[in-house]
Image (spheres, rainbow, N blue to C red):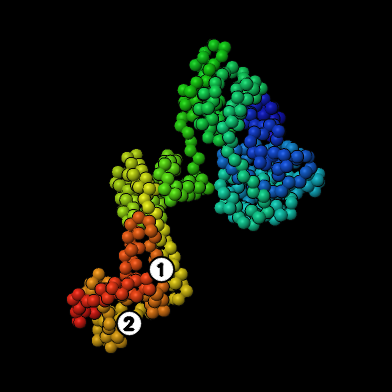
Amino acid sequence: MDLFAQSAKRRQVGQPLAERMRPRSLGELVGQTHLVGPGRILSDLAPGRAIPSLILWGPPGSGKTTLARLLGETLKADLTSLSAVEAGVKDVREAVAKAATRRDQFSARTLLFIDEIHRFSKTQQDALLPHVEAGTVTLIGATTENPSFGVVAALLSRCRVVRLEPLADAELAGLAARAVEDRERGLGALDVALDAEVATQLVAAAAGDARRLYSVLEVAADLARRAAGDAPRAQITAEHVAEAAQGKTLLYDKAGDEHYGVISVFIKSMRGSDPDAAVYWMTRMLEAGEDPRFVLRRMVIFAAEDVGNADPQALGVAVAALHAVELVGLPEGVLPMTQAVTYLALAPKSNRALTAYAAARKLVREHGALPVPARYRPGSTALDRAHGHGQGYKYPHDFAGHYVPEDYLPDALVGTRIYEPSDSGFEAELGARRAEIDAAKGDPAGSDAARSDAAAPKKADPKRSAP
């Protein structure tokens, strides 16, 4: 940085409000008391103190970059910053080489801050690994994504992951009030006023993001100042905040942690029979730009996995909603989506399709390809019949109740139960039907009458064989 750039930085020329209002010490930091409060991992820091390599994981505007800068200043360590979007392996190696020189010549520690570290490739992260392990640099990585997905396991194991939380409404309101009054770094020179009701609107627009709070406040204050003209005091109004905010930007990365979090709670809301929450989370995804077909595919899966035969119509409702949205598109498509999601949320639930498939899969993997019983093989040719194929097969429609007391599983699995109907919704009726059939097969709980009725042929055809 040359002398002119240093002078401009001191005078805060061209810097946005968010940059000007950054805390100058850990004592000024708002929020994250679980990290910097008394007895916490980043409390009681002093020059020269060693800290572990850290991965700062949190949403935008929660203070990741600010915290990294404050750590460098508090520890009197050199802070080298790289952006994962712009830096490559060469930049990493150069930063590490300079850190090694400072350590060897001046016994100085280096904090290597990498913003958006989850965007680093595996090769770039592997290039960091030996230097973090050797202590040449103390890594401070910042990410908005779950580090388990974006940071390689070897590097992650050498770092302490700390979670930064969105700022609370009261904390954001305090930041706004401080910025309005601060004449040195804030908006005090503009002589603007912000009442409590408008501050609440401003905080809602920020949604836990301090950077967005400052951005909206700065534009709203400028609008208020221009509207006031030569008046000594300018009042920031709700209209100014609405104009500055231009609609709330929803936190939702379609390939990241927030994406998985929202779709997870959406499914859990339907499973928990909460139509209000299910519609809310569906709307969050759609308003953030999620492809409606992604949401609908999850609903189709849910209809089979979590509702199943407790309400056989649920699958049809979900598939119909998918077809409807493909036909009419958005915005009208939100109506069949809302109809379907509320139906699925309130439908009786059963996961027996899931458990039945899992049980059958386990048997297939344990026993391999068990042979088909000869009586159920097609007896189409003389050779087939000579081997007993199709011999002894009973055609169910020729018997009372349209079933026969037989077991169609491989001989080694006869008597195995895979599908157990639940007592929920229509599946309770299927359970009663299953009990009737089991009784006819000779289940101890069944009756002799049921067995004899099922075994009595209606129109036995001695020429009929397996198809």
Query: Does residue 29 sit above or below 229 in this rendering?
Result: below
View extreme (bottom): residue: 386
Numbered label tally? 2
Which residue is at a point 39% across and 51% down the rendered structure image?
Answer: 299
Which residue is at a point 58% across and 35% down the rendered structure image?
Answer: 168
Amino acid type at image mark 2 = Ala
| Front-most of residues 366 and 140 | 366
The circle on residue 432 is none
As helix, strand or loop, the secondary structure at mark 2 comes to helix
- Residue placed under numbered mark 1 in the picture: 418
| Front-most of residues 235 and 315 | 315
Query: Does residue 212 sit above or below 409 in this rendering?
Result: above
Residue 405 in picture, x, y percent from top left: 31, 75
Residue 359 in picture, x, y percent from top left: 44, 67
Picture quadrant of residue 199: top right
Measure the C-alpha gap from mark 1 to mark 2. 22 Å
Picture quadrant of residue 69: top right
Whether residue 98 is visible to the viewer of this picture, yes or no, is: no
Of pointers 1 and 2, the one earlier in the residue sequence: 2
Whether residue 365 is visible to the viewer of this picture, yes or no, is: yes
Residue 143 in picture, x, y percent from top left: 59, 45
Which residue is at a point 64% across and 57% down the rendered structure image?
Answer: 154
Residue 349 in picture, x, y percent from top left: 39, 54
As helix, strand or loop, the secondary structure at mark 1 comes to loop
Amino acid type at image mark 1 = Ile
Quadrant the C terminus occupies: bottom left
- Residue placed under numbered mark 2 in the picture: 374
Crowding at dot 1, Cα within 10 Å, few <14 / some 14-19 / many 20+, comes out as: some
